[in-house]
Amino acid sequence: MAKRLQAAQSGNGQSLGAAPSRGGEARAAAFPWLLWPAGQWGNQQVWPEFSPNLQAPAGKPRTTPAPRRSRAAPAKAAADGADPVSSLDRLLHATLGRLTLGISPVALRLAYADWAMHLATSPGKCQQLAEKALRKAVRLAIAAPHMLSGDPSARVIEPLPQDHRFDSPEWQQPPFNLIHQAFLLNQQWWHSAATGVGGVSSHHERVVAFVTRQLLDLVSPANFLASNPEVLAATMREGGGNLVRGAANFWADWERAAGGKPPIGADAFKPGERVAVTPGEVIYRNRLMELIQYTPTTRKVQAEPVLIVPAWIMKYYILDLSPTNSLVKYLVDGGHTVFMISWRNPCADDRDLGMDDYLRLGVLEALKAVRTIVPKVRVNAVGYCLGGTLLAIAAALLAREKRSPLNSVTLLAAQTDFTEAGELSLFIDDSQLSFLEDMMWDQGYLDSGQMAGAFQLLRSTDLIWSRLAHEYLMGQRPPMTDLLAWNADATRLPYRMHSQYLRRLFLDNELFEGRYQVEGRPVALGDIRVPIFAVATESDHVAPWRSVYKINLLGDADVTFVLTNGGHNAGIVSEPGHPGRHYRVSRRAAGATYADPDGWYAAAGSEPGSWWPAWAAWLEQHSAGQVAPPAARGRSKDYRSIGRAPGQYVLER
């Protein structure tokens, strides 16, 4: 760290952002003006029809190759406005971040200090907690003899509906019934202690409740050999074979994680072989994305093509997994001309890519290509997760320019308002963001492992502790599936883009409040007039459905809202025939009265099956009819085939 700080102070051309890549090489971050000519960051591949203030250069190439990655680049201190003092601070924070998994110790201390000081000056709350502790202790003491005698009716507390750690019959046998009941009572008391303390800010209260729950989950009796009856029974039955397998699983996982390798079994789901196999061609590539055009399978297609904008926080083939659950294949076989953006996995050299770059080089460049290949018709645009948020920005920008090429907008688990972003917002405040930005400043990006850790904490009981107990104590490794393999094929996020996204959208909510600026002028979601189809999922911890539902507040757009069961990924990958699927759907016409989410949920009836057919019918309803499929790549020389799908970028790790 001292050597890197000295390099920054001397200005000798060493990059402060150089960080080991996944291959182990130290790669330096380049100045943004080395990657883009001065004053032309946004008009390398701009469509003048949509941005009349920007001029596209004449004779532009069909593709913009990715920049060559250099081992050394000019120092970025000037670009970041950093002086030696702030550089020292940032390097310290970045080092701490590696030890704290990216969680700011200052933010955590502030939250607990707020809670503890207010609790210390709340004698009434303290008395209430003492009374609760006494009542729970008395209840447990009275029930203990009955539980230890094996009486199944002596339970004093039931787990929460989503808590399945103690469902097994072994947990109802003494003394394990007493152990897990004591744990649940203790967990309930701590929730009462962490919440309802007068004067504590709502954000700090949620942080304290969340972190306290994580600490309690850490010491759950289900996590330890001596207190888990399922593990003890398996150990006795197998003579310790489960522990031997568990130790082997742990060692294999540690070895692969240390070497940057995917989990065991994930190699069998390589894109282009078992997943992402829908036939198509890459017709365009720039430094940020590849555009795939899929081969039609029907004699007639809907006149309007479909452009899908996935999130760059994930690989695109979540929407093109196996042939049996591929949304892309479903659309193609249903008579649609489908295009898909495949984002490049950024590295430290891409640290200065921002939200505007993803807008210009991503959505608008893709729209230009689609409109060139399928001219004279409008486009059905689809955005998933963060890609849906970006698509909403693009739709608002195009509406502002009054030259929108969009026929409809579909948003899949995508937020436009971030005031109720769920537990993910616990990681979003000024202190936490400054800490996270210093980590990204040092690396040049947010690493996929750091991102995955935050998402797993949101469901730590299922995604961390239950998994560890099954794999390392029971010795039972679940079979690898296409969805699990895709989930392990994670991506990185550029420093500038992720900082802008968290501050401008999550923290300041600029988009929904009409303050998000593109080209120096704000864009407004209220300008969008095309029909909107919005899908949310009931168990979504990334984009909670009540947050997604706020798209209904756009009074001048016709909104069809669907709520399906499942989580952020499984609820979207919900092919027809998938067992146990159901959904709710309603339409709010432009100018109609708004219904609050809870009232809507109570009134909307549940429909069995997948929501995909309902969406397909909606697309057909908003289509001008069927036509012959367009010629591959149209008649434009700018969009010749570069290679077969899934392309190159999706294979980058």
Image (cartoon, rainbow, N blue to C red):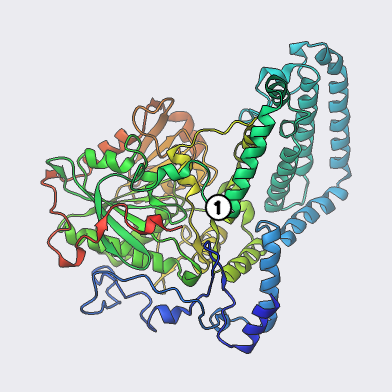
Q: Residue at x 79, y 35 (%)?
A: 189
Instruction: Mark yes or no: residue 31 visible.
Output: yes
Q: Nearer the viewer, residue 338 or 47?
A: 338
10 left or right, relative to 321: right
Image location of residue 402, percent across then percent down? 27, 64
382 left or right, relative to 4: left
Image location of residue 305, percent across then percent down? 22, 50
Figure quadrant of residue 363: bottom left
Badge 1 crowding class, 10 Å Cα cut-off, few under 14, some 14 to 19, many 20 or more, is some
Q: Nearer the viewer, residue 68 or 586?
A: 68
The residue to which callout 1 is attached is 419
Q: Residue at x 74, y 55 (%)?
A: 111
Image location of residue 505, percent across then percent down? 51, 60
Q: Looking at numbered disc 1 in the image, what kind of residue is underneath it?
A: Thr
Q: Is residue 220 above or below residue 95?
A: above
Image location of residue 428, percent across then percent down? 61, 57
Viewport quadrant of the N terminus: bottom right
